[in-house]
Image (cartoon, rainbow, N blue to C red):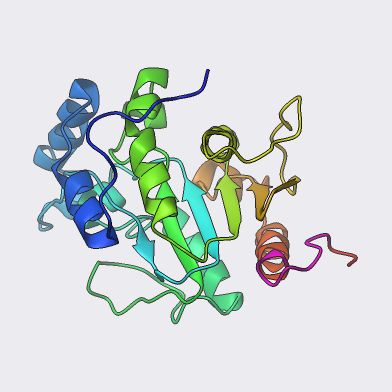
Amino acid sequence: MVRRPIGRSSPHSLPVLQREIVRCRACPRLVAWREHVARVKVARYRHCKYWGRPVPGFGDPAARIVLVGLAPGAQGANRTGRMFTGDRSGDFLFAALRRAGVANQAVSRSRDDGLTLSDAYIVAVIRCAPPANRPLPDEILRCARFLDGEIALLPRARVLVALGAIAWRACLIHLSAGRTLIPRPWPRFAHGAVVSAGSRVLLGSYHVSQQNTQTGKLTADMFDAVLSAAKRAAEGLDPSPHS
């Protein structure tokens, strides 16, 4: 089913859209959970002032590469207010982005730690931390306009890197809603999968979660290969490793 925009039309600038994201209270279950986590802090974060709000994307507004995650981590972005900041998933991700030459540092601890991205931007399918990291279908649908809106406001965006199966499907729906021709049947998610969709390229990667990185399902070399493919695709080159 093709999703439809919810609410007013998309803002005309990233800062305006990001302020709208931070104010959102559209999903009662997610609002209750994100605010509960912010109130009931785990011991090691009791000194932190929790964000406990939806998390907008961040990065280079001129980016050609857009990384699409699932949702803020309850003790990570839900605490810091910046995607993949302050948790182990971010440790893995930003180290890789640094190796790829699109981040100026390999760690991300807080929104004011000096981290900047070049030619890369990070968004998420869901902007609130979901219980058990499992958003419901109606929550994904309701939040879709923020994904669509942020990507639409990145004029040079050429490559989407979907971190996980939920992000993969969200990217396919985003591309289809923009009337981009998608191969039928829709390609299934796989690590290293590549889909050419008009002027855009969609790449698949296992999510950078601890569940994947600590079990070896996703290694640094595997993720580096995806980022290398993304950089090639951003240049208009064949993203396959043997090109």
The answer to whether 124 is drawn above or below residue 241 in the figure is above
Figure quadrant of the C terminus: bottom right
Q: Which residue occupies 13% across, 36% down? A: 35
Q: Which residue occupies 57% across, 68% down? A: 96
From the viewer's perspective, is 77 left or right of 213? Answer: left
Q: Position of residue 173 (x, y in %)?
A: 55, 32
Q: Quick check: is 43 in the magenta stretch?
A: no
Residue 25 visible from this viewpoint:
yes
In terms of image quadrants, where is residue 115? Answer: bottom left
Q: Position of residue 19 (x, y in %)?
A: 17, 53
From the viewer's perspective, is 53 left or right of 228? Answer: left
The answer to whether 154 is drawn above or below residue 195 in the figure is below
Which stretch is magenta? 233-240
From the viewer's perspective, is 9 left or right of 31? Answer: right
In terms of image quadrants, where is residue 127? Answer: top left
Q: Quick check: is 239 in the magenta stretch?
A: yes
Q: Position of residue 98 (x, y in %)?
A: 53, 76
Query: Is 96 in front, or is 13?
Result: 13
